[in-house]
Image (spheres, rainbow, N blue to C red):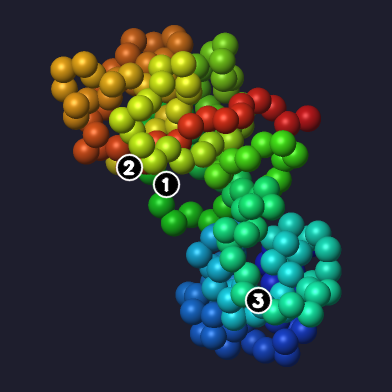
Amino acid sequence: MTTKERLKKFLKHLNTGQNSFERKVGIANGYINNLKGSIGSDNIDKIGTHFPELNIEWLISGKGEMLKTSTVTDSFSIVNFKQRGYAPFYSEMRVSGGQYDLAKIGDEEPDSWVKFPGITADAWFPVIGFSMEPKIYSGDIVGVVVVNNWERVDTEIIYMVVTIYDRMIKRLQLDESDPEIIWAISENYPKFKLHRSEILKIYRVVWAGRLV
């Protein structure tokens, strides 16, 4: 059963229509019909806040029962859901390990929410390109966590950088003379400059490989 099918099942339980549900929750008209993958963080929060009896883990992953078995009716928080190990997986939002022009991360919905034992990540993405081999191969997936302080990048760590132009995985090095420049370093290509004004967000790669 897909996320859309589970959501429709919950609406049937509520005995309410899609338009009425969307208006109450505050999501876009036609959102349910257009849902192709999973549900984004913002809309999960909205649904969980308006319907605290709904088991969000069931809605996203199909695990457990539709309704909470506990009598506790506190509001759902996406923070709590992430603390349980779940993170969004964006199968169509590829990360460049080569020379590719990829659109920046916007408001795309994840295809699913996943949890891997022992790995804590903010999000998961597939990789294309060969510039980081043999560290990361095309076809791998990477788990990433956001970096809040760009002043202490480590050249031994692999990062995912989101710019106004693309998403890429690189090692990073601060420029010694110009604080507005960060050098992007690949295993197999010459390094190049990134201007801080072009960078939207930096993540640290915490896991890379194939799922078997």
Dot 3 crowding, Cα within 10 Å, few <14, some 14–19, many 20+: few
Disc 1 residue type? Answer: Ile
Disc 3 residue type? Answer: Asp
Disc 2 residue type? Answer: Leu
Percent coordinates x, y for residue 83 in the rendering: 64, 52
Q: Are marks 2 and 1 in contact (CB under 8 Å)?
A: yes
Q: Which residue is mark 1?
A: 105
- Mark 2 against mark 1, which lies toward the viewer? 2
- Mark 1 against mark 3, which lies toward the viewer? 3
Lower sequence index among marks 2 and 1: 1
Lower sequence index among marks 2 and 3: 3
What residue appears at the point 72 percent right and 40 percent down from the top-left corner?
116
Label 1 to label 3: alpha-carbon separation: 31 Å
What residue appears at the point 41 percent right and 21 percent down from the top-left corner?
154
Question: Which image quarter holds the C terminus?
Answer: top right
Label 2 to label 1: alpha-carbon separation: 9 Å
Q: Which mark is residue 74?
A: 3
- Mark 2 against mark 3, which lies toward the viewer? 3
Dot 1 crowding, Cα within 10 Å, few <14, some 14–19, many 20+: some
Q: Are marks 2 and 3 in contact (CB under 8 Å)?
A: no
Q: Which residue is mark 2?
A: 200
- What secondary structure is marked by label 3? loop
Q: Residue furthest left?
A: 177
Q: Give 30 or 76, whichever is nearer the viewer.
A: 76
Label 2 to label 3: alpha-carbon separation: 34 Å
Residue 27 appears in the figure: yes
- What secondary structure is marked by label 1? loop
